[in-house]
């Protein structure tokens, strides 16, 4: 069976096409569009321009699907359409114009799907899943490959950039505002911080971009998937000088994240402090693969005692 899966994210809209056989999946094709939907949110609601942008990208994806022999096309949305005041109206407009059904998943469900996807390819028994998106961050604590807690907090790399940064890179005052905003959100999740989690299993575009920067700066092979937590602070220091060298360092490695990588890495840094983490292992699977396993292949997450 061949499935097309569209992830309507706050920063990037992605479409992957997978072949599924005997409970295993293989990526056949992938494409993305840096739609930046979180940037179209004004006073809590997505603007008509943002809705039209989502429609346009989905129609592009739909035209690509027409060239494949696809059994099913699934579309789901995360914080991009979940965390806006006009969610129902925006979804209705998009569905009516595209003819596609959109599954708006909750923050907790997104975190669970991250866990399902990541634990398929990363051999970590106990740890913390961290998925930093454009509009939200999902956290899952797990032990013996069973979920202990799964939550979502409404801060991401793009909405922090929009809220706190006036130019391309944040200045010293703006970095303090970003940090204070992150800390304020993390203070509200105290109930899940009951022990250290030394290993972070990183999911999503921000973490993958951080891996690329880490490998580039420290001259590591591209296939390296481990990041020493202490490197995060060092990389942030390199990128935060507001100089041409800082811009070049980002543009040469992750040009599509020039404005969001610093806010995203600051979330990662603060989360690692709270959970006293030492290392990040970057997963190639995340919410999209988790959605496929859960919704289509019917493989569910296991839960442990909180």
Image (spheres, helix red, strand yellow):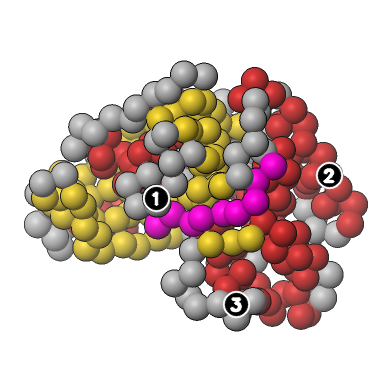
In the displayed structure, would residue 278 be above or below residue 192?
A: below
Return the residue at label 3. Answer: 216
Q: Residue at x 49, y 69 (%)?
A: 224
Return the residue at label 1. Answer: 123
Q: Nearer the viewer, mark 1 or mark 3?
A: 1
Mark carried by residue 183: none
Nearer to us in this view, 227 or 246:
227
How dense is the environment of label 2, judged by Cα within 10 Å: few (below 14), some, or many (20 and up)? some
Position of residue 230 in the picture relative to residue 118 (left or right): right
Nearer to us in this view, 297 or 77:
297
Position of residue 181 in the picture relative to residue 36 (left or right): right
In the displayed structure, would residue 72 be above or below residue 220?
A: above
Return the residue at label 2. Answer: 177
Place of residue 78 in the rendered image (x, y in percent of width and height, measured from the top left): 45, 37
Magenta-colored span: 276-287
Q: Earlier in the sequence, mark 1 or mark 2?
A: 1
Q: Residue at x 33, y 30 (%)?
A: 301
Q: Nearer the viewer, mark 3 or mark 2?
A: 3
């Amino acid at each position: 069976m061949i499935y097309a899966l569209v992830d309507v994210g706050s920063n990037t809209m992605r479409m992957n096409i997978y072949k599924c056989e005997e409970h295993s999946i293989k990526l056949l094709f992938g494409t993305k569009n840096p739609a930046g939907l979180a940037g179209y949110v004004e006073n809590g609601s997505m603007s008509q321009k943002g809705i039209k942008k989502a429609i346009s990208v989905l129609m592009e994806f739909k035209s690509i699907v027409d060239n494949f022999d696809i059994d099913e096309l699934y579309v789901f949305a995360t914080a991009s359409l979940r965390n806006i005041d006009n969610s129902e109206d925006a979804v209705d407009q998009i569905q009516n114009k595209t003819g596609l059904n959109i599954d708006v998943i909750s923050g907790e469900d997104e975190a669970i799907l991250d866990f399902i996807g990541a634990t398929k390819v990363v051999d970590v028994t106990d740890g913390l899943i961290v998925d930093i998106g454009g509009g939200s961050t999902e956290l899952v604590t797990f032990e013996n490959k069973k979920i202990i807690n799964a939550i979502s907090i409404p801060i991401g790399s793009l909405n922090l950039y929009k809220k706190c940064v006036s130019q391309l890179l944040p200045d010293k005052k703006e970095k303090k505002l970003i940090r204070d905003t992150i800390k304020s959100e993390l203070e509200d999740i105290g109930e899940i911080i009951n022990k250290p989690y030394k290993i972070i299993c990183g999911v999503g575009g921000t973490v993958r971009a951080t891996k690329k920067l880490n490998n580039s700066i420290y001259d590591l092979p591209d296939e390296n998937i481990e990041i020493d937590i202490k490197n995060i602070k060092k990389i942030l220091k390199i990128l935060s000088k507001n100089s041409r060298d800082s811009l070049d360092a980002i543009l040469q490695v992750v040009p599509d994240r020039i404005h969001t990588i610093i806010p995203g890495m600051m979330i990662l840094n603060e989360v690692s402090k709270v959970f006293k983490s030492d290392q990040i292992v970057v997963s190639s699977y995340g919410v999209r693969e988790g959605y496929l396993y859960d919704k289509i292949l019917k493989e569910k997450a296991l839960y442990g005692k909180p």
